[in-house]
Amino acid sequence: MTSTAMIPVAEDTAASFGGRLLRTGDDGYDEARQLHNGMFDKRPALIARCQTTADVVDAVHLARDAGVEVAVRGGGHGVAGRAVTDGGLMIDLSPMQGIHVDPRRRTVRAEPGLTWRTFNRAVAVHGLATTGGVISTTGIAGLTLGGGIGWLMGKYGLTIDNLQSAEVVTADGTVLNASDDEHPELFWALRGGGGNFGVVTSFEYRAHPVREVLAGPLPHPFTEARAALAFHREFTASAPDELTVGAALLRAPDGSGTKVAAIVPCHCGDPASADADTKALRAFGAPLADLVQPMPYPIVNTVLDDAFPKGALNYWKSGFLPELSDAAIEVLVEAFERVPSPMTAIFLDHVHGAATRVDATATAFPHRQEAYSVLVLAQWMDRADTEVNIAWARETFETLRPLLTDGRYTNFLSADDTGFLRQGYGVNYDRLVQVKRDYDPDNFFRLNQNIDPAD
């Protein structure tokens, strides 16, 4: 393990650094090194809590001069735990939370330490929104760089489909602006290629007029789970772009521990059409409650927050179902019948509409066919329960695997999912390798879903 003494900080760098340089024992060190996923307990030799792009440049030079491993932390939500390093240098972007909304141009310039909760709130003041995941505590940086499945994707595409430019600190400490006009290959790679190419210090997004949505969960008794998921399949087959519908097998949030099959719509279009478009969904079966209601868009991104507490131990398996077949439904329901933890859930995101009307090679994110993104999310609190929960997730995934496509969503890959790397980048892998060679030939940024420039 690298000692702190092996990462020297020159006096002039220490004096000019706008954030904080934390070592073991410093106030704030333990809090800064902790990730959302409690599975990981690593201790960096140095944590550079950056306030500005200049701080990021300094941190890159510190790590390179010391020859140590570097980790980059945005929101810290990545399930694979690669935002922290043992003995190396962590570049902590969480203090960088600046945001500027231009309502006339409908653009947003945002720094990488923001979560979607803060981003959505700032943008909503102007009656605007950008596709941004389904959990408000997720950081904008990681979700964006991996693709960005979210509630608005049917109408407005993935998060990366709304990215217009990015400021990037590369492996040699150079600051670049990447867009369709400047460093277009780098900009292409950033939209789905993760943190392989540099540290993004600001994102410029396109925003859309979305003030209120019709959304909320429709929980059905678990005894009706097969019927509910079959209806979900039939209903989503003709859902309009404005209506994105998710489904989940999980425990009721009322503390009863009751298993439910929930269908969760989010309609971002005209209120009059929203009622008509969701009528059949709300009329199906006998839900335990109908919590679908008009709400400000930022609220829908908080509906599932309580199911993802910080510090819980997480192990995920995921893939894409080309169809929600009866066989797939049977695997999911049977697996949830024997789930070992009350915190575990299975989620289905219906990828459709605008998100699928983009060519697979237009951005680095290649998964543009209509499909159901399935996430087997094992979650528990006691480390003694780790083995049984991981075993359940792996067994569930292996049973489901023959029904999946070859594609994988890199934002959902766990630490041991390295064998699925090419499936994550798909047809774009070779092109991504070339961009990696151009911008990070030494693989300085390797704590990610790593693209090896030597491939």
Image: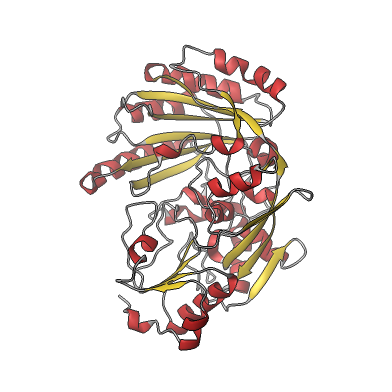
- Work out whether 211 lies above or below 32: above
- The location of residue 159, given as percent across then percent down, is 63, 48
- The location of residue 244, given as percent across then percent down, is 61, 31
The quadrant of the rendering that contains the N terminus is bottom left
- The location of residue 401, given as percent across then percent down, is 43, 39
- How are the residues colored? secondary structure
> At 63% across and 43% down in the image, what residue appears?
131
- Work out whether 111 lies above or below 368: below
- The location of residue 35, given as percent across then percent down, is 39, 56
> At 33% across and 46% down in the image, what residue appears?
312
Observer-nearest of 177 and 212: 212
Observer-nearest of 15 and 343: 15
Residue 108 falls left or right of residue 220: right
Q: Does residue 148 appear in this view?
A: yes
Observer-nearest of 439 and 49: 49
Q: Does residue 130 appear in this view?
A: no
> At 45% across and 37% down in the image, what residue appears?
402
- Work out whether 114 lies above or below 437: above
